[in-house]
Image: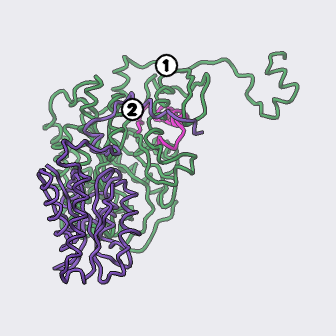
Chain colours: A purple, B green
């Protein structure tokens, strides 16, 4: 079972960001199933978590609903991340979610980036804002990002084509259909350490490794 | 004594949001001493102070504070919450706390912590990214300094030691008991378990799930390292309450302090935070019930400390909180005692450690009179002194 989490940061109802997120989720489902694999898609809408995200910034811990969302991302095989463009970049709400994720959660995880805006003039936001963010987080960013301006929702083949291409690339990166995907290496998370604690002998040896620092 | 009850302070100098008045450092330092003395008066077992090296705190130099309080109290155990094992030279920690042990006849133990204030590390020549490694190497050295009379040592984070004897030697030949505090670093639970030391979870400002996970790991690993069963591991918890006989009065009075508190202020509501963390604001009965519920997720434990004096609460209010704490103390003791499973060890004290070690012994390292004392870097070049040093005179 391939698990995909779609994170979207749209604010209005209905939201074109959520619309694009749904399109990407459905296209990815088709692409994964076409490879003969099963898929489970979980949607996380950040609007409902806005209070908990701000609280997390101030208190340093997540309340239950946000923790559940974070756990979904941690356990996901791939992530689809969709934001509206605010002031020439991802929205603050979108960034906050990725700010509160523990370092290492996205290591080696395929991430499909997408954004919506009023006009096509913002289309490079994917390249100058989202791609560097996920590169820093050590995610594997799908080569095709999907940008949709309001006009794109008027119909026409361009947006669905791009959505399908991005979804197919994501499915390829998930390594489904071609045998068992091998778990990608990632930094040790706190949960890993709880599950499988490093023995103290190792910690002690590791502590003093390296050149003197005095 | 089955379980110990006490208070811990971080020594913050914070404006009282209801009056706009901020205490001076002098007032806050003196207030801390008042609070510690009153803690003893109401029957508490432990007073612990944190350590900070930056404003708005007055918690630098915890050893002077503890020794000063020790001189004015009779029974209360003096402890730390926490001692910065990362940025403090373990050679100084060994000396300082052994000295307080002697001065207070064994009424001292300490809790190791790493400290999370980034700039403090470079101020003391360290790097916060090495926090865990510093905690591990420094503590390994500290233990040796207390347990071995003469230490040869070299490591990564401080200059080597050759033939070094830490003085004074621990009182009665028994080092102070050590707790290790950490909120969410499994490595520290592992460290505490490895040595068979105590583990303390600060248990304030954080959800109980963090506490449960850390204590569980510590207990499992304590057993793994052969110090006893998981139930016999030594666990301490923090906590935070604000009490008034009438619970609505407590909420109304505490809310402005909560809303403006340095750590969590301007964030979640008092109600949300009380639900998400062990903070209890209400009647004495509510505090008793909440406190008794802690053992449901950590098991029977040995030490409970509460944070009472922060966020700008005036001294008078803190002393009233201590009075109320004193009033519920007999109930807390009796109820915890009733619930405690057989075989759970008592909280460690100097007396219990001495007994475990097979009795007190004089650990003084008697040395020859030192003919080099008094020499300075200049004296060494003085031909007369040089002759003394070389044994010619």
Q: Give me the disc on residue B362.
A: 1
Q: Give me the disc on residue B177.
A: 2
Q: Position of residue A37 (x, y in %)?
A: 13, 50
Query: Which chain is indicated by disc 2?
Result: B
Please determine whether, in this image, residue B261 is positioned above or below residue A2. below
* In this picture, residue B278 sits left or right of residue B314: left
Given residues A119 and B237, the one toward you in this image is: A119
> Of label 2 and label 1, which has the lower sequence position?
2
Query: Which chain is indicated by disc 1?
Result: B
Q: Tell me the crowding category of disc 2: few under 14, some 14 to 19, or many 20 or more residues within 10 angstroms, Cα based.
A: some
Figure quadrant of residue B214: top left
Locate the C terminus of chain A by quadrant.
top right
Given residues A132 and B317, the one toward you in this image is: A132
- Residue plotted at (43% across, 45% down): B114
Does residue B103 belong to the magenta stretch?
A: yes
Figure quadrant of residue B351: top left
Residue A13 seen in render = yes
Figure quadrant of residue B377: top right
Q: Position of residue A77 (x, y in %)?
A: 22, 51
Q: CA distance from mark 2 to mark 1?
A: 18 Å
- Residue plotted at (47% across, 33% down): B101
Q: Position of residue B78 (x, y in %)?
A: 41, 41
Q: Give me the disc on residue B82.
A: none
Residue at disc 2, secondary structure: loop
Q: Which residues are magenta?
A: B84-110
Q: Are discs 2 and 1 located on one and the same chain?
A: yes
Does residue B133 belong to the magenta stretch?
A: no
Q: Position of residue B202 (x, y in %)?
A: 32, 48
Residue B250 seen in render = no
């Amino acid at each position: 079972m391939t698990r995909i989490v779609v994170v979207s940061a749209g604010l209005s109802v209905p939201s074109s960001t959520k619309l694009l997120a749904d399109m990407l989720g459905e296209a990815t489902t088709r692409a994964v199933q076409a490879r003969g694999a099963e898929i489970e898609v979980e949607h996380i809408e950040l609007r409902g978590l806005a209070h908990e995200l701000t609280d997390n910034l101030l208190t340093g811990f997540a309340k239950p609903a946000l923790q559940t969302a974070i756990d979904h991302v941690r356990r996901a095989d791939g992530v689809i991340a969709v934001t509206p463009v605010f002031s020439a970049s991802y929205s603050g709400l979108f960034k906050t979610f990725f700010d509160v994720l523990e370092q290492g959660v996205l290591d080696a995880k395929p991430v499909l980036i997408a954004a919506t805006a009023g006009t096509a003039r913002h289309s490079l936001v994917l390249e100058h804002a989202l791609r560097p963010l996920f590169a820093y987080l050590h995610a594997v960013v799908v080569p095709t990002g999907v940008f949709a301006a309001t006009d794109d929702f008027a119909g026409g083949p361009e947006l669905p084509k791009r959505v399908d291409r991005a979804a197919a690339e994501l499915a390829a990166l998930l390594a489904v259909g071609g045998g068992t995907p091998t778990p990608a290496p990632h930094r040790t998370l706190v949960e890993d350490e709880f599950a499988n604690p490093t023995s103290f002998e190792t910690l002690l040896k590791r502590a003093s490794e390296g050149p003197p620092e005095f | 004594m089955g379980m110990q009850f006490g208070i811990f302070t971080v020594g913050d100098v914070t404006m009282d949001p209801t009056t706009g008045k901020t205490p001076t450092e002098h007032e806050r330092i003196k207030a801390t001493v008042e609070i510690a003395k009153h803690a003893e008066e109401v029957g508490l077992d432990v007073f612990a102070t944190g350590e900070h090296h930056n404003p708005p705190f007055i918690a630098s130099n915890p050893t002077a504070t503890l020794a000063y309080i020790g001189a004015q109290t009779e029974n209360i155990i003096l402890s730390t919450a926490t001692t910065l094992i990362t940025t403090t030279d373990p050679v100084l920690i060994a000396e300082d706390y052994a000295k307080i042990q002697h001065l207070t006849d064994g009424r001292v133990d300490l809790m190791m912590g790493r400290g999370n204030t980034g700039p403090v590390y470079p101020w003391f020549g360290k790097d916060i990214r090495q926090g865990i490694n510093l905690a591990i190497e420094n503590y390994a050295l500290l233990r040796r300094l207390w347990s071995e009379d003469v230490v040869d040592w070299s490591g990564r984070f401080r200059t080597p030691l050759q033939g070094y004897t830490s003085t004074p030697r621990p009182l009665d030949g028994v080092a102070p008991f050590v707790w290790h505090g950490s909120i969410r670093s499994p490595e520290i639970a592992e460290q505490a378990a490895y040595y068979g030391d105590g583990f303390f979870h600060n248990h304030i400002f954080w959800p109980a799930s963090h506490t449960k996970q850390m204590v569980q790991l510590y207990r499992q690993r304590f057993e793994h390292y052969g110090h006893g069963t998981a139930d016999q591991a030594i666990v301490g918890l923090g906590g935070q309450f604000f009490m008034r006989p009438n619970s609505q009065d407590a909420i109304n009075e505490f809310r402005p302090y909560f809303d403006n508190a340095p750590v969590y202020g301007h964030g979640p509501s008092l109600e949300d935070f009380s639900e998400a963390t062990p903070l209890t604001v209400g009647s004495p009965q509510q505090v008793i019930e909440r406190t008794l519920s802690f053992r449901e997720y950590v098991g029977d434990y040995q030490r409970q400390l509460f944070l009472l004096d922060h966020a700008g609460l005036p001294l008078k209010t803190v002393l009233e909180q201590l009075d109320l704490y004193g009033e519920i103390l007999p109930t807390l003791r009796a109820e915890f005692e009733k619930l405690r499973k057989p075989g759970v060890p008592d909280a460690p004290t100097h007396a219990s450690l001495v007994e475990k070690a097979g009795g007190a012994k004089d650990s003084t390292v008697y040395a020859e009179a030192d003919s080099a004392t008094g020499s300075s870097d200049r004296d060494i070049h003085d031909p007369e002194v040089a002759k003394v040093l070389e044994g010619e005179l």
